[in-house]
Image (cartoon, rainbow, N blue to C red):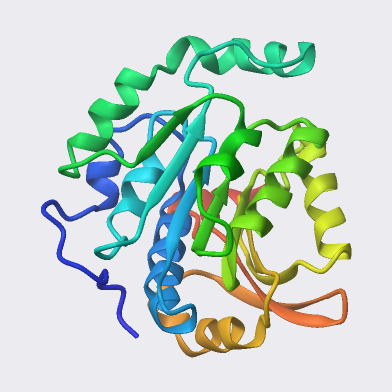
Amino acid sequence: MSLIPSQPMATEITPKKLKKIKGWFSRLDQKIFKFLLNEADDLCGGGDAAEIGVYLGKSAVLIGSYMRPGEVLTVVDLFGAPASDDDNREENKIFAPKISIEKFRENFLRFHPELPVTIQGLSSVITDHASHGSHKFVHVDASHQYEHAKEDIASARVLLKPQGIVAVDDYLHPNYPGVGAALWDAVAGGLNPVLLTPFKFYGTWGDPQPWKDRVAENLDILGAPHEEISLRGTRVHRFSIELPVIVRKLLKLS
């Protein structure tokens, strides 16, 4: 299966072009997003997509390129608006000054002719605006507080089709243990791992085997160092970043 998107794009979304949008989105995860969104047309029969936590739109731009006619992309973010509690307000002091809904719209419209459904507000309102059970893909990348991350992952389950994929950001980040705690709570409650990267967890509440089979069949296309590991009684592929040659040499010398 190729990584060609399911509909022609006015502007091809390449890592070089995405680099112009500020934000954190590794080339490895960009490639995996493309792969999973493309495969979702077959394994899910297509569907809507949502992003919970947008920042300046780097990943939303890519997701938008894999929406077919009639499918809806919905995004939600505070976009600089006040947070709901003290912990989240402290966290947002780092990022909020850099975020505005106007900048997101500007970035998105550089690549696409129309904006997605854009909600400025708490991530918890996503289920009030996006249709339930119709989504092929949901990206969770909002508050890093445990209670909020847990609610966002639960919202993703409400939105997703049975075989839909959720991507959860920062599940391994040492500064955000609340995300990891919320994610592994969800796994204990029935979320099935599909594949892992250093930055994002990918899983489904449906049958993970068709997804894992597609991953195993396309390891060359995904083109990254990987290993198959055991996780809660199942086997999943874990991908890692290919370090530059100079870094690998320095590590050998240390």
225 relative to 62 in the view: left or right: right
Residue at position x 37%, y 54% in the image: 72
Residue at position x 33%, y 42% in the image: 116
96 relative to 85 in the view: left or right: left
For residue 30, above or below residue 21 = below
For residue 252, above or below residue 208 = above
Where is residue 54? Give x, y as percent. Answer: 47, 35
Query: In the depicted view, which residue is nearer to us: 83 or 13?
Result: 83
For residue 164, above or below residue 10 = below
Query: In the depicted view, which residue is nearer to us: 185 or 158?
Result: 158
> Does residue 8 appear anywhere in the picture?
yes
Residue 105: name its quadrant.
top left
Where is residue 152? Give x, y as percent. Answer: 68, 43
Where is residue 46? Give x, y as percent. Answer: 40, 73
Residue 145: name its quadrant.
top right
109 relative to 238 in the view: left or right: left
Figure quadrant of the N terminus:
bottom left
Residue 6: name its quadrant.
bottom left
Residue at position x 39%, y 17% in the image: 100
> Does residue 200 appear anywhere in the picture?
no
Residue at position x 75%, y 34% in the image: 148
Where is residue 203? Give x, y as percent. Answer: 66, 67
Q: How many marks?
A: 0
For residue 114, above or below residue 197 = above
